[in-house]
Image (cartoon, helix red, strand yellow):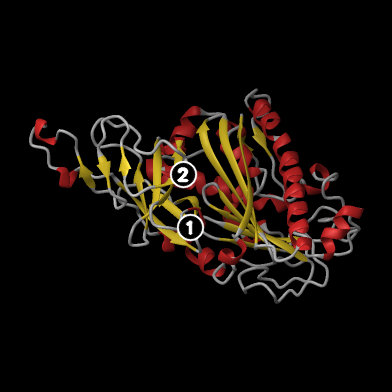
Amino acid sequence: MDGSSSNDTTWHSKHPHLGTGPLPTNVFTCENQFQLEREHIFKKLWLNVGRVEQIPEPGNYFVQDIAMCQTSILVVRGKDGEVRAFHNMCSHRGNKVAWDKHGSCKAFTCKFHGWTYGLDGTLRSVPDEKNFFDLDTSKLGLTLVACDVWEGFIFINVDPQPAEDLTSFLGEFGTRLHGYPFADISTSSASWTTEVNANWKVVKDAFLETYHVAFLHGRSLPDSFTSQSNPHNQILDLRLYPYHGTISLYGNADVKPSPVGSIAFRHGASLIRQNFDPNAPPPGVNPGRHEDWTLDLNTVFPSFFIDVSEGSYFTHNFWPVAVDRTIWHSTQYFPKAQTASQRFTQEYGHVLFRDIILEDGRTLEETHSMLASGAKKEFYLQDEEILVRHSHHVIQQMIERATGTHAHV
């Protein structure tokens, strides 16, 4: 882990193991690379599937289909209050037990032949059971999936024997975010989901740097993250961990918002705040205590983002479907509005966030289509794009360790 850079020190010089050379473009388009990522990353690591607010009461459940892991996951709160996860598969003929994306029930009954399972996954009932041959129902419950909760975020691991628990996987990254009021802020949210015709790393990499802000977001965020003193939105702070990473973003407190934006701004706009107290967030947020800080971009390997500001946060989940297809799910969270003005501000924040991610999304399919052309064999990264390099480095290191071969990145 390393902190903020001085004027005469680049981020890469503090992390020389990452190198500074170009990276190959075929990691985005190679089917073999995609299958290696499936087997040695997504099927081995902890993946975020939701938050506890989605299942507040016993019997509440939701389903997360994970194409990259070739399964469907059923997440349910049991009668004992525990959150559990199962493969969404009946032990009889393999039908999905839960067809709806979310709901509430006292038990799960397969619609194919009526086998019924308790909220704890145990097999409770088999119609015409006497007509089976030596059926041991005690061994035919739903298949349990490793599941744990961190700061209200639900994670699963489809590896039958995960190499490390969730706490170890998150490490110092998880410890640093302790104290951020995720539960208080997660009471109001808005979500967007789309499928993008691009490799998951193309999508992820677009959110790992701020070099693009002054150009791609010049319309939605004019001068919000740039100024004469920081025209390219150079980051304030960098923290790299074995898997994960954090960067602290600059915000221009002197920005002049639009007439409508100025109204929201007065009541706590979601992006840039005036009269900001750098010591207000927990120690792990804005760790450099910069007065011109606006938010921390936190990337949880392999494909989950938690970007936190003083009074709101948003998440991105990037779910690979194929080498050239990715499901992108984003959610913006606010605390419950106490006044009409706060509600107005939050709605303005939702619309602004929508416009920002539409701009982000505009580049993704265009990028992948040209990478697939093979016209360029390498791509080049500048110092501020170090999280992109770090992510590719971790991917290739994991594949090399698992296969015993030397990868090309």
- x then y, percent, for residue 220: 82, 46
Drawn side of residue 275 relative to residue 17, left or right: right
x 10%, y 30%: residue: 131
Q: Looking at the image, is mark 2 or mark 1 earlier in the sequence?
A: 1
Secondary structure state at the residue bearing disc 1: helix
**In this rendering, is residue 238 above or below 43?**
below
For residue 405, what is the image quadrant? top left
The residue indicated by pointer 1 is: 52
x 39%, y 51%: residue: 76
Q: Nearer the viewer, residue 223 or 100?
A: 100
x 44%, y 36%: residue: 36
Q: Residues within 10 Å of mark 1 (few under 14, many from 20)?
A: some
**In this rendering, is residue 254 above or below 32?**
below
How far is mark 2 from mark 1, CA to CA? 13 Å
Looking at the rendering, in which quadrant would you find the N terminus?
bottom right
Query: At label 2, which amino acid type do we have?
Result: His
- x then y, percent, for residue 297: 65, 57
Q: Residues within 10 Å of mark 2 (few under 14, many from 20)?
A: some
x 29%, y 53%: residue: 120
Disc number lying in front (2 or 1) = 2
Drawn side of residue 54 relative to residue 294, left or right: left
Whether residue 66 appears in this view of the structure is yes
Secondary structure state at the residue bearing disc 2: strand
- x then y, percent, for residue 224: 83, 56
The residue indicated by pointer 2 is: 102
